[in-house]
Amino acid sequence: MSTQTQILNDVTAFIWHESDLLDHKGYQDWLQLWNEDGLYIVPAEFNADGNYEDTLNLALDDADMRSMRVARLENGESVSANSTGNTIRMVSRVRVLEAGDDLVIARCAMTLNEMRHGKLVTYPADVEYRLQPTGDGYRLAGKVVRLMHADSFLRTVSFIF
């Protein structure tokens, strides 16, 4: 198997693992996937230019904010955590954009389906992963979730994209 194919397989397995953790509310394990300085970003516009610190975002979470977000979801401390629904993510079109010794950048399509209060809501997104290779896999150095309808009406979100 070529190195490129192996990298794609390893990246895909990592993304699937992360999706499975989030769908099954394995938030503490999800937190362990991250580098301390990694950023979880959900821009307020699908075509955001990448200057996230100077623009409006639905999420711009460093390690402390990720931990607080998880605590609210696990402890019901926020209104959005009440009646938390179930989610199923479908990931496709995984593509490695760059593969270096210190950083792998990949992009995929994701559809997050949420069932809450008997209603199904779908969130299509383009997701970019910045992954730091380690001896036994990858650590998240960054994740940007570009929601297709980020600039239109969004329900109260009670999950991590």
Image (tube, rainbow, N blue to C red):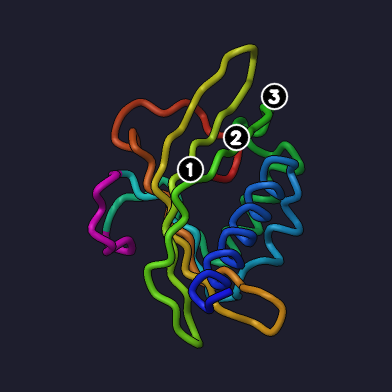
Furthest-bottom residue in this view: 101
Q: CA distance from mark 2 to mark 3?
A: 8 Å
Q: Residues within 10 Å of mark 2 (few under 14, many from 20)?
A: many
User: Closest to the observer: 104 or 28?
Assistant: 104
Q: Quadrant of the N terminus?
A: bottom right
In what element is the residue under mark 1?
strand
The residue at which mark 3 appears reads as 83
Is residue 42 inside the magenta stretch?
no
User: Closest to the observer: 153 or 33?
Assistant: 33
Q: Amino acid at mark 2?
A: Ser
Labels 3 and 1: the sequence-earlier one: 3
Q: Is residue 151 left or right of residue 39?
A: left
Q: Which mark is residue 110?
A: 1
Depth-wise, is mark 3 or mark 1 nearer the camera?
1
The residue at which mark 2 appears reads as 158
- Count how many numbered circles sit on residues in the image: 3
Residue 14 rendering spot, x and y as whole percentages: 63, 61
Q: Is residue 146 left or right of residue 83?
A: left
In what element is the residue under mark 2?
loop
Q: Is residue 102 above or below residue 138?
A: below
Q: What's the magenta bit mostly, secondary-structure-wise?
A: loop
Q: Amino acid at mark 3?
A: Ser
The stretch of residues the image draws in magenta is 45-54
Please name the residue shown 48% across and 27% down the image.
Answer: 122
Depth-wise, is mark 2 or mark 1 nearer the camera?
1
Please name the residue shown 63% across and 52% down the image.
Answer: 16
